[in-house]
Amino acid sequence: MSKPFSQACENNKAVILSTISQYFHDAITVLELGSYTAQHIQYFAEKLPQIRWQPSDTSDNLAFLTAGLKDVALVNILPPLVLDVSQQSWPMNQAGGIFSANTLHIMPQTHVKDFFDGAGKTLEAGGYLCVYGPFKYDGEFTSDSNARFELWLKERDPLSGVRDFEEVNALAQQAGMTLVADHTMPANNQLLVWQKEP
């Protein structure tokens, strides 16, 4: 398999790094959910070498992730894990931080709840969960392009869709996490940051 590539990852990796580095800066282990092409995790590992990065994805995407990590010689990237958020028990017991980009709108709504339940159990007390992607506020899209994106998602999979901020924030709170920041990002995306209660 040739090395996978996402232009969106290439476009947004620097601005995401500048934001998450406010929260991920100590010598911790950060779990990435949905690493896919591994472009984000490779870039973050190069720029934040004091952090150990744990890539993960579903079994269906593991071949893409493995190909993306081929020939990457960074000692602070751990071997990839197979992780489906709907698993009863995640393969990583504890993480100092968790990051995920463009995953919540891909998975079914039932798995969004699983995502936050699992993150709440896995995240260490005081650790941060950083989630990047498009969101709706009070049921409204932040842009016409996100509304069109929703239509494309629904045609592809009726169970997917741009998630409501209020709903995901409620799920995070139920999982023991408190919203600490909502960063507006380029291309009509947000980066939401929750902290696990100490």
Image (spheres, grey):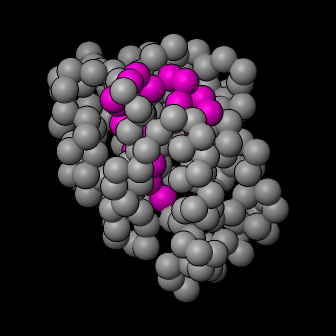
Using residue 37 as the reference point, say whether residue 198 is left or right of it: left
Q: Quadrant of residue 87?
A: top right
Magenta-drawn stretch, dominant element (helix, strand or loop): strand
- Depicted 141 relative to depicted 62: above or below: below
- Depicted 80 relative to depicted 99: above or below: above
Quarter of the C terminus within the rendering? top left
Residue at the spot 54% in from the left edge and 44% down from the top edge:
173
Magenta-drawn stretch contains 41 = no
Nearest the viewer among 68 and 89 is: 89
Residue at the spot 60% in from the left edge and 29% down from the top edge:
118
Quarter of the N terminus within the rendering? top right
Q: x, y (%) of residue 126?
A: 33, 29
Which residues, given as a range, are shown in magenta?
A: 116-133
- Depicted 92 relative to depicted 161: above or below: above
Q: Quadrant of residue 40?
A: top left
Residue 70 can be seen in this image: no
Residue at the spot 66% in from the left edge and 72% down from the top edge:
150
Q: x, y (%) of residue 179?
A: 41, 50
Q: Quadrant of residue 110?
A: top right
Residue 98 can be seen in this image: yes
Q: x, y (%) of residue 121?
A: 55, 24
Nearest the viewer among 17 and 43 is: 17
Using residue 100 as the reference point, say whether residue 29 is left or right of it: left
Q: x, y (%) of residue 76?
A: 27, 19
Count numbered badges in the picture: 0
Residue at the spot 72% in from the left edge and 21% down from the top edge:
88
